[in-house]
Structures are given as structure tokens and as C-alpha cells.
Image: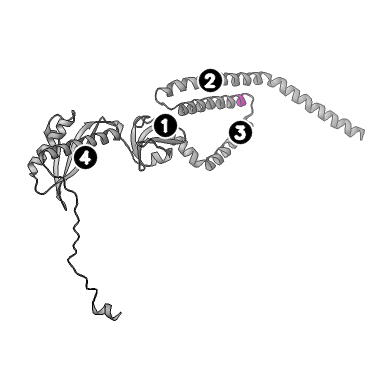
Amino acid sequence: MKDQFNTALGNLIDKLIGWFNAIIESIPNLILAILVLIAAYFAAKYVSRLVGKIVDKRVEQDSIKSAISRVSAVVVVALGLFIALGVLNLGKALTSLLAGAGVVGLAIGLALQGTLANTFAGLILSFRKKIQIGNWVETTGYSGEVVDINLKDFTLREADNNMVIIPNKTILDNPLKNYSLTTRMRVFLECGVGYESDLEKVQQLTKETIANTFDQVEKPEDVEFYFTEFGGSSINYLCRFWIDAESMLEKLRAKTEAIIAIKKAYDQEGINIPFPIRTLQFDNNLNINSSDSKES
């Protein structure tokens, strides 16, 4: 029994001595690994600020800039950690760490599939020059001013001041009309005049009225005018002209001014804008004293 105890004690002492020698031999590598981690920490702060300045020139959203800066810092720190593990000759630990990170990343990706999709979509939208904060856009049935683009959603302010929050992924998957990409818009105006009207006079008066109302229309010939149909109570036409505008609200204001100006011009010239008329005919007498009613 005593011999067994002495043998076990000797093995334990040998093991401790081996560990001690290994620690002593690894001190230079340990110091180097610590220096690598410290250097990675300061490099991450520098890279984060540098990336932030670069992104600031292309992205207006603070949330996007902060997220990109943090991701760049995490990448630098992770790279420093892997180098430090390699310096310590912990290749197996490094392999296990990478494998574990892959499994965890896969699990997180599956669990947060929708959230990650919106996050990456938000990053893509932030770097698109054709979609900027302040633009007036129309998408998925909504129209309004872009007030925010973050990592989760896309926010519009409609003309009635209501906020519409749309997931970023929905914006990328659907068509988007940006009214602010051009400085000119075409106004479409439909109206009708009575059958007794002089159509050539109507055409010329309408063109002159539009040209006199809007500075952007230099002469009446710049206004497009087409009679479209013989309607139920009027001869209908389509009028089109260009204005300087970057939002749907400006287009609506211009259309309102055009309608008011045309109505005044027609009133002065005695041109009638008819409205639908329904005639009710009561000349069919109903015989309530029929034989059927008497029998009942």
C-alpha cells in the first residue's frame, strides 16, 4: 500500500513538474500572445474610427454607421484572437473554436433568418445612391418622404403626416418609384366640355391658360392636348404638361392650380363643363286594380 502511494505521489510530482516546465517554456509565447491581443484591441479602435469616417461620407443614418464600425472592430479583435491562439500552439483549440462558431452561427442564422434578412437589406439600402433620406418615394402601395433607414425597417412620412414602417426586405423585393431622382414631372389633367362647345377654341384656351399659369411652360405649344372620347354627357380630353417638381405634393399643387385656372377661363368664355345627368321616367302607369289584385 505504501509503495503504491509513493508511486502515485511520484507520478503526480512528475506531472506537476512537466506542467511547470511547459509553462516556463511557454512564457515567451504567452507574452507575445498578450501583446497580440493588446495590439488587436487598439487596432480595432483605430479601424472602427477609420471605417466610421469612410462610411460617414456615403451613409447618413447613424445606426448604420455605428453598426458597420462595430462589425469592423469585432473582425479585427477576432483576427487578433486567432493569431494569439496560433502563437500559443493551440491549434486544436483554434479548430474547435472555429467549428463551434460555425455551428452557433448556423443556429443563430436559422433562428433569426427574417431579422438578418432585414439587417443586410438595410445595409444595402444605405449604400444605394438612388434612395436617400428626404426623397419622395412610392412603394408597396404607400407614398411619402423617406425619414429613416435603419437596420430593421424603412420609414416613410405620408402626405397626411402618418408614418409608415416597412421592413427593409420588403423594399428590396418590390418595385420603388423615386420622384426625387428627377427635377421635372408631368401633370396629367382630364376634363370634359359640353357637346355644344367649339372644340378648337377649347383646345387653344386650355393651352394658353396652362402656359400663363406656370412659368415652366414657355409657350402654349408646349402643352399636349388630346380629345379622348365622346362621353355620356361631355366630350372628354387629356391635357399634359411638364413642371419643375421633386415630390408628389408639388405635382398635386400644380394640378390644383391648373384646375382652378381652367375653370375660371371656361367661366369667362361661357364654356360648359357638364356633369352626369340621370333622367327618371314615370309615364308608365301601374294598374293597381288589376284582376290579380282583386282575386287576392
Label 4 is placed on what type of residue? Phe
Work out whether residue 104 or residue 263 is closer to the camera in this orientation and state it.
263
Work out whether residue 156 or residue 62 is closer to the camera in this orientation and state it.
156
In the picture, the quarter occupied by the N terminus is top right
Q: Which residue is mark 4?
A: 188
C-alpha span from label 1 to label 3: 38 Å
Q: Which residue is mark 1?
A: 148
Label 2 is placed on what type of residue? Lys
User: Which residue is depicted at the point 55% across and 37% down?
Assistant: 105
Among numbered discs 3 and 2, the one appearing first in the sequence:
2
C-alpha span from label 2 to label 4: 55 Å
**Mark 3 or mark 4, which is nearer to you?**
4
Which range is magenta?
83-87
C-alpha span from label 3 to label 4: 64 Å
Q: Is residue 19 left or right of residue 271?
A: right
Element on which disc 2 rests: helix
Among numbered discs 2 and 1, the one appearing first in the sequence:
2
Q: Which residue is mark 2?
A: 45
**Mark 2 or mark 4, which is nearer to you?**
4
x, y (%) of residue 139? Answer: 35, 40
